[in-house]
Image: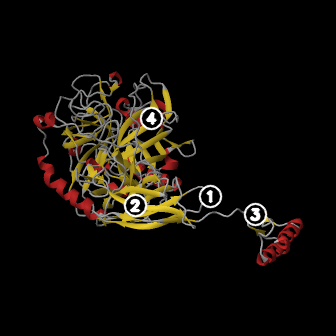
Amino acid sequence: MLAPPVSGYTSATLEPKSQHTSKIQKEKTDFIKNEPHVRYDSENAKNRRDRNISDESIEEDNRTLPPAPIPPRNGTKNATDNGSGVHSYNLRTNQTDRESQNNTTLFRTGSTNNSTRYAGADFGAATVNNSGENEANLQPKDASTAPDGVRNLIRNTQKYPWSGIVLLRIDADGNGIYDYFCSGSLVDDNHVLTAGHCAYLYGEQGNSIGWAKDIVVIPGANSPDQYKQPFGIAKVEYAQTYSEWSNNRDYRYDMALLTLDRDIGDLTGGFGYTTADANSSVYRTSAHATGFPAVPPSNSIPSLTMWDHVDSGAGVTYCRVSQSCLGHEYWMITTAGQSGGPVWQYRELNNSTDGAYILSIISHGFISPNRPNVGTRITHDRFDDLGSWIKRGNEIIKVDNRPELAVLDPIESDNIDVKGYSPSTITAGNDILKLRQVVKNKGPKTTGCFAVSFRVSSDSEITADDPELANATVCSLAPNQRVTVSANVSVDRPSGDYYVGVIVDPDDEINEYDLYENVQIYDEQLTIEQGKRESIHGLVYDENGTPIEEAEIKAVNLDTGETVARTETGSEGEYTIEVAANNEYQIEATADGYDRSSAIVNVSKNKTSSANLVLTEISEAGLPTKPGEPDFVDVLQVIDAYNTGRTYNGVQVEFIDVLEVIAAYNAG
């Protein structure tokens, strides 16, 4: 339980609940106003500085986490988009399933090559790239052969549409160690669209690794070995891809849909997806390619940060046999790590449907020089397949929405003052320590009531066992909502260097997914100095007025409940103990054989206080069996205890005991 209230004051200020729809809509409007002018200059890219981002929830080995492997192609199949099978995997039950597409595609309408379809936009018309090059001679690779350009570092990944771009951390064999990473994009509240080779894995030599056993999704990630997680994380529960990918490593089917355990997309906003005829100009016009390159374009920027590149499309490909044209070629730079990220365009349609729409999924490049990169195109049939896959995922996996509390770093809040204390050096009992921490609910469910507790520690760990400086209670923190907890306190502790931190929900009142972000210890240590101390004098004696030597005296600060000073009485029962002024203390005296005694003392500045304490001798427990010890009442109480089975002074009374007490009474 939390300590008593502290001196000074503690407050919790809730920010307005996030009006999620209107917030995303404003960001969409702001984005599209700037979209016609999106061009990035190299000088700005070179001058971007690294940022020190800290989050303890991710292991420190992620700087060396490689991207998912790009296996070689397994020959050439007929480029048809009809009758393909679906291969699914339940990560929760470790069960896999293969079905023909016509059994699993609930919304399939057949090949529709005479219309544009979208989650809201009309992209016009254009031509098809019918390259005569033999596709069988082209091998995929993870590095771009597109002409070099300038990619843009996305610093604020909390704004739409960047908030809908996700980093995937992939555990290939289920041993709890993440082996690879990929990119992806949220396409509704609990589904991520990514590349097939990010879910069903192959080695670089083409050997089948199989389904990833664990995938963690981090929307808006933007840091290397200790990720910034502005929206928390989600876990993949169910994955679906085409059998042509899982069976044959056929890059024309390099697409997967991941079903999540929670509605994290409700916090971030997400992408629509669109399709158009293969001859539409949409596939040759300007588009974005976004993701997390393993090797950033700038040496001064850490890996696993989000980058975006805008350039033109190069048409469609993989349509030698059928006009389905399963690939989308583009000149945007996409390198290892960006696999699974979206190739997308922003369309202004109306207030409810304008936004970012995915044309294709970043898949691979080619060893052949001067070739554009290739994405897995969302054809008309695949547009239907995605609707079917989403429905199937929702039928099999029921989301588990919970709150997820997190202490915020400045980097997660546009560098505002979200945490810490001041000043860094104080005089015990005199100076006021100002504490501040912003807490956010990163989960998709509103909280109940919980405490935010500031603590002080003599070591570099903050635990619930450390003394409390201040606390506040917060209730009904909505998804994406933040609360600022502030406190002004007087700290009365011995001089020295201390660590200060905060624990969110120390009593575990909230059912969260995990507790990774519930504790924060501040970097700078707090130095406490002893200023002028005031004295409390007094005497300790027994009921007969006899001084008690070597009685232990301690002073307890009534605001904090902490013992701040100790001493012992001298030969005459005297003591002097020093404490900080302007505080109220309980002076306690204890000695062997005596009951504890205490007195309340209010210590004022430049004034000596006093407290005399009387200790009462502890009587020996047991039966009064010495001659003359019991009186008549004692005899009656012993007899009653025997008759009723109760104890007398902690002793279970037997018949022989009654006789001994009566004999002692008669002897007196």
Answer above or below: position of 330 versus 557.
above
Badge 1 or badge 2: first in the primary sequence: 2
Q: Which one is nearer the viewer's eye here, 435 or 58?
A: 435
Left or right? Give the position of 546 relative to 533: right
Q: Which mark is residue 123?
A: none
Numbered-mark total:
4
* Residue identified by numbered label 4: 178
Answer above or below: position of 454 versus 658.
above
Badge 1 or badge 4: first in the primary sequence: 4
| Amino acid on which the number 2 mark rests in the picture | His
Q: Does the CB distance between marks 1 and 4 fall below 8 Å?
A: no
Of marks 4 and 2, the one in the foreground: 2
Q: Where is residue 563 in the image (x, y as percent from the top left)?
A: 44, 56
Q: Does the CB distance between marks 4 and 3 fall below 8 Å?
A: no
| Amino acid on which the number 4 mark rests in the picture | Tyr
Question: Could one spot residue 62 in this view of the protein?
Answer: yes
The residues bearing labels 3 and 2 have C-alpha atoms spaced at a distance of: 38 Å
Q: Residue 593 carries which label?
A: 1
